[in-house]
């Protein structure tokens, strides 16, 4: 396969990722997905995002994963839209939990001062 072509790079990445016909190698798979993603291959961009999200073949980096999921979503990958929504919902919940924790601390401080 001529790996200068994004679709072939993507297919090689899938084979390496799954160990189909070759030894499983997430690092090399992520490299193939990255090469294809640089050429605006939607599915490779999505797969590379999953690699970063899960630390498969690359260091875990949720910010990079979200960036890549957004890029894949913009290219029309439906599953990437779902992943972006999950990331954003989780961030909203974490913010709300943090705010509730701060409110509880404020209430506790006020209660202690009343005693």
Image: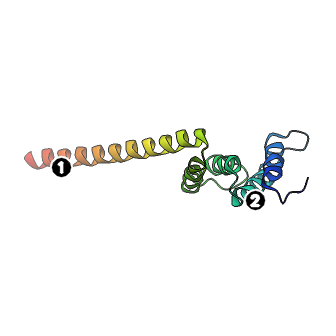
Residue 18's disc is none
Percent x, y of residue 45: 66, 51
The chosen color scheme is rainbow
The mark closer to the camera, 1 or 2, is 2
Left or right? Give the position of 31 relative to 69: right
Residue picked out by circle 2: 35
Q: Quadrant of the C terminus?
A: top left
Query: Residue at 60% of width from left, 49% of height from top?
Result: 75
Percent x, y of residue 14: 79, 44
In the rendered structure, which disc, 1 or 2, sits on the residue that comes first in sequence? 2
Percent x, y of residue 100: 28, 43
What is the secondary structure assignment of the residue under circle 2? helix
Query: Residue at 20% of width from left, 49% of height from top?
Result: 106
Nearest the viewer among 6 and 19 is 6
Mark 1, residues whose alpha carbon is within 10 Å: few (<14), some, or many (≥20)? few
The number of callouts visible is 2
Mark 2, residues whose alpha carbon is within 10 Å: few (<14), some, or many (≥20)? many
Query: Residue at 58% of width from left, 49% of height from top?
Result: 69
Q: Residue furthest left?
A: 114
Left or right? Give the position of 70 relative to 29: left
Nearest the viewer among 88 and 5 is 5
Residue 114 sits above or below residue 31 on the image: above
Nearest the viewer among 23 and 20 is 20
What is the secondary structure assignment of the residue under circle 1? helix
CB under 8 Å between discs 1 and 2: no
What distance separates the C-alpha of mark 1 from that of mark 2? 54 Å
Residue 109's disc is 1
Percent x, y of residue 71: 58, 53
């Amino acid at each position: 396969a001529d790996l200068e072509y994004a679709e072939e790079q993507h297919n090689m990445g899938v084979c390496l990722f799954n160990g189909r016909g070759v030894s499983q190698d997430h690092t090399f798979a992520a490299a193939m997905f990255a090469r294809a993603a640089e050429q605006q291959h939607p599915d490779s961009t999505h797969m590379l995002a999953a690699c970063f999200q899960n630390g498969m073949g690359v260091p875990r980096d949720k910010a990079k994963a979200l960036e890549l999921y957004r890029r894949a979503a913009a290219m029309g990958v439906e599953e990437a839209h779902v992943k972006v929504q999950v990331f954003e919902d989780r961030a909203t919940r974490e913010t709300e939990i943090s705010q509730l924790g701060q409110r509880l601390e404020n209430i506790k401080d006020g209660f202690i001062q009343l005693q």
